[in-house]
Amino acid sequence: MSLDNFLNIIVSGLINGSIYALLAIAFSLILGVARIVNIAHTAFYMLAAYFIYIGLEFAGLPVLVSMVLSVPATVLLGLICYRLFIKPVQEHEASVLIATIALAMVIQEILLLIFAGSFRGAPNLISGFIEISGFRVTNQQLLTIVVALATLGVIWTFLMKTRLGLAVRSTAQDREIANLMGMNVTRVAMWTMAVSVALAAVAGAIVAPLRILEPHMWMHPLIMMLAIVVLGGLGSVLGSFVGAYILSFTESIVVVMLPGGAYLKDSIALSIMILVLVIRPEGLFGVKFEEER
């Protein structure tokens, strides 16, 4: 392996791993608290990226302002979708799954209707690069890693050090006991949905300058997110964090080292997910919900 390939694997693994960790942790939170399998989760990630483009092209806002505003805009839309389409069928798992798939497809088709299939992009927030033995790492890539890791630190602090974080962890562990202890599990679920969509929005916002924006960009992160959650263990935040980096570096190695690896990365992730389901269904850090006890 050449030094360029090694550095490429490290940089892309850190960037993608941090983004996947944000998405997978957010997915695990809402799955653990509200038992919602939110297939539309990565569609909100995509929406945040498109909100940046809309702010730049249609509102004439600076890049930083567009990025900051894209997060609350996505959270607001996510909560509206939750109240209108998910909460009415929340107690029926199959209906929730169908509703979130339909919601993701609706978001995709609306973006296709507005922007067609054209590729869009967002400018870098900062320019420049550093060079390591001839391999260039852009400052935007470094900023993406730093912001993603900082966000992961914030969400850990939120879960471990705040009253709402304690309520989220307690509800995820056992909803019935949390309800008996006087917690408003409905309100906790609403707040968890807001936090979950916010994490997806942050992921979409910070990665937008590094990605081509198109209405199908939510599908690959969805595949990776589901594989990560299964690998780490359903409902496990720690498992989602560890699984994100395992699959991210695996993806980077496949793309860099194998001929046609870019076309194999989804199938590799799905193969790992199937193997985990067969060999160790609870994943690396499996969490048993009260319904399974």
Image (cartoon, rainbow, N blue to C red):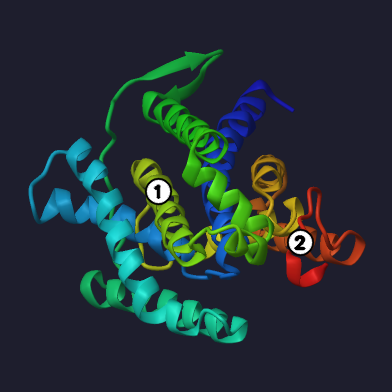
Residue at (44% x, 77% y) in the render: 87
List x then y, in percent, for residue 43: 42, 65
What SS does tag 2 mark?
Answer: helix
List x then y, in percent, for residue 106: 36, 80
Q: Quadrant of the N terminus?
A: top right
Dot 2 or dot 1, earlier in sequence: 1
Q: Nearer the viewer, residue 186 or 47?
A: 186
111 horizontally vs 236: left or right: left
The kind of residue tagged 1 is Arg
33 horizontally vs 110: left or right: right
Residue at (42% x, 56% y) in the render: 191
Residue found farthest to the right: 279
Residue count near mark 1 (Cα–Cα under 10 Å), binned few <14, some 14–19, many ≥20? some
What SS does tag 1 mark?
Answer: loop
Residue count near mark 2 (Cα–Cα under 10 Å), binned few <14, some 14–19, many ≥20? many
The kind of residue tagged 2 is Met
Q: Nearer the viewer, residue 103 or 61?
A: 103
Observer able to see residue 253: no
Residue at (61% x, 25% y) in the render: 7
List x then y, in percent, for residue 258: 72, 47
List x then y, in percent, for residue 144: 42, 33
Q: Which mark is residue 273?
A: 2
Nearer the camera: disc 2 or disc 1: 2
For marks 2 and 1, give the CA distance. 25 Å
Residue 130, by quadrant, is: top left
Q: Is residue 151 above or below residue 202?
A: above
Q: Nearer the viewer, residue 200 or 57?
A: 200
Observer able to see residue 115: yes
Residue at (44% x, 53% y) in the render: 200
228 horizontally vs 44: left or right: right
Q: Which mark is residue 211?
A: 1
